[in-house]
Image (cartoon, rainbow, N blue to C red):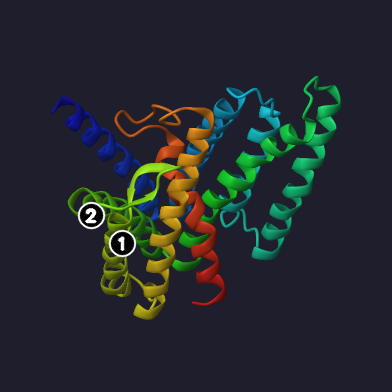
Amino acid sequence: MKTFWIRTASAIIYALLFLGTMYSGVLLDNPRVGIILFGSFLIFVTLGCSYEFFRLVRSQGALPVKWLGYTYALLAVFLVAFAPAMGMKGFSMMLASLILFPATFALAAILQLWNDGDQPFREAAYTMVPLLYIALPLSLMMSVLNEHGVNVLFMLVALVWVNDSGAYIGGSLFGKHKMWVRHSPGKTWEGTAFGVVVTIVLAVFVGPMLSYITWYHWLVLGVICSVVDTLGDLVESMLKRSVGVKDSGNIMPGHGGFLDRFDSLLIIMPFAFAYLTLVV
């Protein structure tokens, strides 16, 4: 019972921070302040996820250039998150962000000349992961908020949460057939299917009420979020199993670390943003 209340309390605090900063522009009737508060939250999460990733790979003997990884990850979030407040337009923001890709790898590779490790390009690649896997997907959350409204972003996050909860409940009630024992022994096909169905129903019926997006677009977004969410959870499980840990961290008692909480969002945001930008 004590564990249940600890998990509940930490989940409430997490949700209040996440949703409170997300809706801060609306609650304070000041979009610019809202951008600063939510952008600051994203920077905090970027640092936490990057720290956990570097800690996991260093436990296996990897030697990424941590300060460079942090620097470029924060720069990417700053460019995207605070671009509207700085009057930075879409093209220049995109150009500046794209330049980070070759710049990060090039400098990380150069710095390996002074590294005594025997796998320099592995270390350079690991240095880039916080930028590619963490910072840019999190930054897209701010892009969705600015371009499509806070309710659309909220719905994307809610779909991930509902899919996770639905898969857990469905697996507990009906789960018999294991889905992918190698990466996640607890996942079942029945639980996954239940989560997908509940997520799509929520997307189709609630999404149009909270946004300008029509039901058939929400149907596609529901499929994207539920399916990619499941795959993102498996990717995080694969990462943790490869280094022999159960949780990526312990920032949230009973729930694990930053990567444990944001693993699915890191995977689904590029897909959801691409659909919103290219199709909707």
Residue, far top = 116
Q: Mark 2: few, some, or many residues within 10 Å (few <14, many ≥20)?
A: many
Q: Residue at x 29, y 53 (%)?
A: 167
Q: Amino acid at mark 2?
A: Gly
The residue type indicated by label 1 comes to Ala
Residue 264 location in percent, x, y? 44, 50
Q: Position of residue 39 (x, y in %)?
A: 50, 46
Circle 1 packing at 10 Å, graded few (<14), some (14-19), many (20+), is some
Find disc 1 in the rendering and name its residue. 193
Quadrant of the rendered structure where residue 129 is? top right
- Disc 2 + disc 1, Cβ < 8 Å: yes
The residue depicted at 56 percent of the width and 54 percent of the height is 85
Residue underneath mark 2:
170
Which mark is first along the chain, 1 or 2? 2
Q: In the figure, residue 193 lies in which quadrant? A: bottom left
The residue located at (79%, 31%) in the rendering is 120
Q: Is residue 205 left or right of residue 227?
A: left
For residue 10, side relative to residue 108 (left or right): left
Residue at disc 2, secondary structure: helix
* Coordinates of residue 92 in the picture (x, y in percent): 71, 60
SS class, disc 1: helix
